Image (cartoon, grey):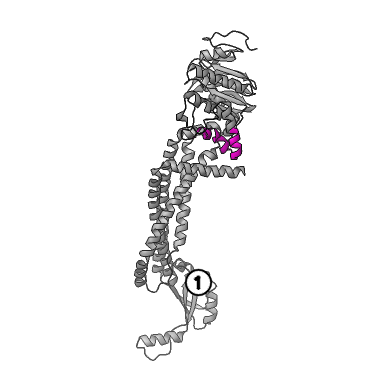
């Protein structure tokens, strides 16, 4: 019960601190909200791009041409055991021959084409892992795959991932700096008060707790603002972008967009973590008790 | 209650205290006197662990402060009442809230807080000033708020660092007499001061510091430019 009362007092002290900070609260929340909005927008774009690139990757096919002596179903079953394989489709040589005859004027020969397996991958980067394994299967004569495209897709995906991490790190650092400076100002303004509390024997938790909570509240408030802005963008701009994407790449599956809920949770989590973390770091650095 | 053993304190190689040995018993009332720069404030700061000695041991209530971890310092300070020359009140809080602050920080319920704060304000004769703010009060009243804040948690030791430094002689005497009354209830009171008339009026134990050394320690003494008479402590 006593611990609960102390926690309640810490919350009250936080509110008093926020009230005393006056206009600077709005300044901090605005700056952080801008940083978090940029972060949220970039997160949304990079994650959606990542999904698009992954979808491209999963559209890639390896063609495995079978020996005349092998049983296509048996080989297909063997191939589907590999974890890199998403889907295996058997294309009988008769079907291939019919398609060829339909497309080209072919002399009346006996069917020279082999039975084929069309193998879809779980991810583009699995092409180079899977192809050598397929070559070792005795029933497979030859394997063909779009290596260059797979490599480009993999490289692009890695670039997006690294860019996402770099932007997150840069914005987190900027946010930490803003929070840290604000809490530093609060500490300077309350320097004498903090000194008095320390001499009265008030615990470190009770002195630093409200400052850390204040930082966390800045983070949460800024995240809420950023979420509001991104929601509006999602509502009014996203449909247009989606239409453009569909006309650009009509074969891509629907629902590639990274969920807004995930972005909002990431913003809230990052805002609170960076707010509280920045305050804790600044309190530890500038409050010598 | 307070014990210093061979305590030395240097600042950048310059000694502020040299080989100080001191014992103040439970319930005792003592003055720590000396001119500016004698080491009074340094000694007081060692007692509330604002500083640590360069050498020697500082014990308060049996606890060796030199071995205290930083996280244990608040616990120590809750067992001390500290009174300052400049009162150090929270300006944006009422008298009641100033005195109640530490009790609330310790998680006491409001019923207990009210009881203890009112009792402390009664002791310092400010029971009708709970709603006032520090800047609405005279220096003497502010110092009495400081004393109420120092005693509200019932500490066994009161340390007063130049408590009369900003007060007129009559108010100074009132404050010191108030501290004496608190001491009579069993609290150890150590007052650092260079207020000669007050020390001489009280006729209590006088510990004299000069250039960082205890040069005299006298029961029922006077502060007379280093001349101390009457019963010398054994």
Q: Position of residue A116 (x, y in %)?
A: 46, 80
Q: Position of residue A278 (x, y in %)?
A: 46, 45
Magenta residues? Answer: B89-116
Q: Residue at x 47, y 50 (%)?
A: A272
Quadrant in the picture for residue A1: top right
Whether the magenta-drawn stretch holds residue B94 is answered as yes
Most extreme residue toward the bottom, as rendered? A108
Residue B26 pos. (x, y %): 65, 22
Residue bearing the label numbered 1: A85
Near-viewer residue (B221 or A90): B221
Label 1 neighbour load within 10 Å: few <14, some 14-19, many 20+: many
Question: For the point 38% across and 88% down, which residue is it?
Answer: A101
Q: Is residue A229 left or right of residue B21?
A: left
Q: Judge left or right: residue A251 versus residue B100.
A: left
The answer to which of B54 and B148 lies nearer the viewer is: B148
Q: Main secondary structure of the magenta part?
A: helix
User: Taking A29 as reference, is B16 above or below it?
Assistant: above
A93 inside magenta stretch: no
| Left or right position of B215 against B135 | right
């Amino acid at each position: 019960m006593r611990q609960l009362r102390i926690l309640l007092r810490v919350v009250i002290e936080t509110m008093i601190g926020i009230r005393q900070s006056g206009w600077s609260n709005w300044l901090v929340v605005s700056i952080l909200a801008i940083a978090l909005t940029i972060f949220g927008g970039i997160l949304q774009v990079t994650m959606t791009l990542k999904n698009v690139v992954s979808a491209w990757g999963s559209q890639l096919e390896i063609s495995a041409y079978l020996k005349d002596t092998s049983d296509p179903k048996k080989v297909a079953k063997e191939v589907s055991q590999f974890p890199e394989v998403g889907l295996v489709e058997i294309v009988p040589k008769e079907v291939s021959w019919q398609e060829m005859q339909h497309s080209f004027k072919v002399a009346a020969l006996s069917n020279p084409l082999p039975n084929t397996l069309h193998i879809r991958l779980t991810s583009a980067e699995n092409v180079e892992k899977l192809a050598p394994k397929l070559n070792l299967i005795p029933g497979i004569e030859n394997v063909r795959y779009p290596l260059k495209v797979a490599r480009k897709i993999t490289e692009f995906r890695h670039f997006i991932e690294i860019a996402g991490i770099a932007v997150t790190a840069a914005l987190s650092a900027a946010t930490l700096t803003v929070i840290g400076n604000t809490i530093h100002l609060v500490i300077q303004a309350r320097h004498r008060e903090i000194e008095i509390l320390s001499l009265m024997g008030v615990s470190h938790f009770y002195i630093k707790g409200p400052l850390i909570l204040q930082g966390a509240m800045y983070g949460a408030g800024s995240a809420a603002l950023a979420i509001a802005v991104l929601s509006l963008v999602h509502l009014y701009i996203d449909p247009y972008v989606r239409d453009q994407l569909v006309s650009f790449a009509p074969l891509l599956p629907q629902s590639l967009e990274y969920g807004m809920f995930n972005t909002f949770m990431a913003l809230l989590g990052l805002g609170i973590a960076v707010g509280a973390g920045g305050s804790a770091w600044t309190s530890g650095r500038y409050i010598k008790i | 209650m307070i014990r210093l053993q061979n305590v030395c304190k240097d600042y950048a190689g310059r000694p502020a205290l040299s080989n100080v040995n001191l014992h103040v018993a439970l319930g005792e009332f003592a003055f720590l006197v000396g001119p500016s720069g004698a080491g009074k404030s340094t000694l007081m700061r060692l007692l509330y662990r604002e500083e640590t000695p360069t050498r020697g041991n500082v014990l308060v209530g049996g606890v060796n402060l030199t071995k205290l971890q930083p996280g244990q310092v608040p616990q120590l300070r809750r067992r001390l009442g500290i009174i300052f020359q400049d009162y150090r009140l929270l300006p944006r809080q009422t008298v009641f809230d100033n005195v109640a602050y530490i009790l609330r920080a310790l998680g006491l319920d409001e019923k207990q807080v009210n009881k203890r704060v009112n009792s402390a304000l009664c002791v310092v004769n400010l029971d009708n000033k709970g709603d006032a703010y520090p800047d609405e009060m005279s220096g003497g009243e502010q110092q009495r708020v400081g004393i109420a804040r120092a005693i509200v948690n019932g500490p066994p030791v009161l340390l007063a660092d130049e408590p009369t430094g900003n007060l007129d002689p009559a108010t100074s005497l009132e404050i010191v007499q108030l501290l004496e009354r608190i001491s009579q209830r069993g609290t150890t009171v150590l007052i650092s001061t260079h207020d000669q008339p007050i020390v001489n009026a009280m006729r209590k134990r006088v510990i004299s510091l000069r250039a960082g050394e205890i040069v005299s320690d006298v029961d029922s003494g006077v502060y007379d430019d280093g001349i101390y008479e009457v019963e010398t402590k054994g």
